[in-house]
Amino acid sequence: MFTMNQTRVMEFILLGFGNLHSFRIVFFILFLIIFLSTVLGNLLIIILVSTNVQLQSPMYYFLCHLSFSDLMMSTNIVPNMLGTILSRGKKITFIGCITQLYFYSGAIVTECFLLSVMSYDRYLAICNPLRYSSIMELKCQIFLSLWPWLLGSTLNLTAIFPISNFNFCHNNTIDHFYCALSPLQKLSCSDTSLIELEAFLYSMPLFILPCVFVIVSYVYIFHTIIKIPSTTGKQKTFSTCSSHLIVVGTFYGTLIGKYMIPSKEHSMYINKIVSLLPTVFTPLLNPIIYSLRNEDIKTTFKKSFWLIMRTFS
């Protein structure tokens, strides 16, 4: 079943959703459509924001980074998952498995802090509009977008290095569609107590604190919106942050469903279904939410579309 160098597994087998049977092709086509839509939607946002003057603002600059994070998440997980569906399992090297876990955890951490940065941007725009332009200059935008990526790419190394030194001396079959931490811990015959402690300690600064920061920011935002005298003014102001608020609720809702519910209380199959939320559906929903609820993006897309059509015709 597996290749070993003493107690070192050199490759794993991802089982994915092995019991789909006759629905295998249907699910493959469904997830392929979702994957292509995710890539197209996020690339479209990046291209529109990068090439149109109307969208050259801090809010859309941070949205580009969010789309890039979603692209990294989706392209890191979904192609391998499609392989497991089509072939009822897929081999992945030990290095490939660790690399996939690194980019997955890095994208999660980066997105947590990007969403908090975007909430700070909305706080400044609504609660302190007179100083917004002077504070959110280009240097500030670059700094605020850079440190989430730095944290996402460095902090998870403290867990990746110990995992890369695990000994897997029983089998190499991972009952999941990607290299998640929990299945790797179950397969390992090394002491995983340090990793479990690190995961618990890191959950506070990496997930809970950004979530609290977002909540506090929106408390101030709602307090400011309530003081606006006209109903039209309240609706117009709230519309500038409603898309971000929905994305935040969707993202943290999926994380709570995946990480806050103890895995021992439900089966591995349910765990895999819950894991689809942050890895497959959230990267798809983010561009849809911003496209459908944002008039600037819809208007820019229509103009760009008709300009392309006139060029080719």
Image (cartoon, rainbow, N blue to C red):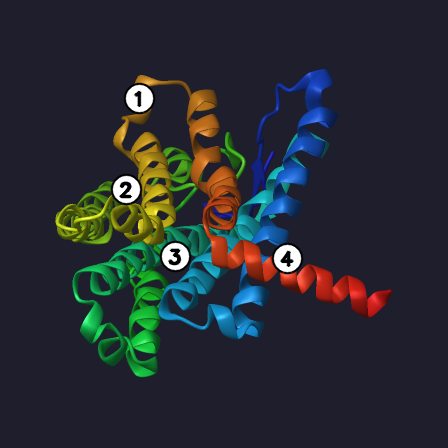
Mark 2 Cα shell of 10 Å, populated few (<14), some (14-19), many (≥20):
some
Residue 247 in percent (x, y) is at 38, 45
Above or below, comparing residue 111 to residue 153 in the picture:
above
Which residue is the site of mark 4? 302
Q: Dividing the image into 4 quarters, which one contains the N terminus? A: top right
Q: Quadrant of residue 155?
A: bottom left
The residue lying at 54 percent from left, 49 percent from top is: 74
User: Which numbered disc, 4 or 2, marks the residue that appears first in the sequence?
Assistant: 2
Residue at 38 percent across and 42 percent down: it is 181
Determine the residue positioned at 24% across, 42% down.
Answer: 196
Q: Nearer the viewer, residue 45 or 182?
A: 45
Q: Which amino acid type corresponds to the residue marked 2 in the rendered image?
A: Thr
| Quadrant of residue 106 within the rendered picture | bottom left
Looking at the image, is mark 2 or mark 3 earlier in the sequence?
A: 3
Q: Is residue 97 above or below residue 47?
A: above
Question: Where is residue 283 shown, x and y percent of the image?
Answer: 49, 46
- Between marks 3 and 4, how big is the CA–CA gap? 34 Å
Assign a secondary structure to mark 4.
Answer: helix
Q: CA distance from mark 1 to mark 4?
A: 49 Å
Res 106 label: 3
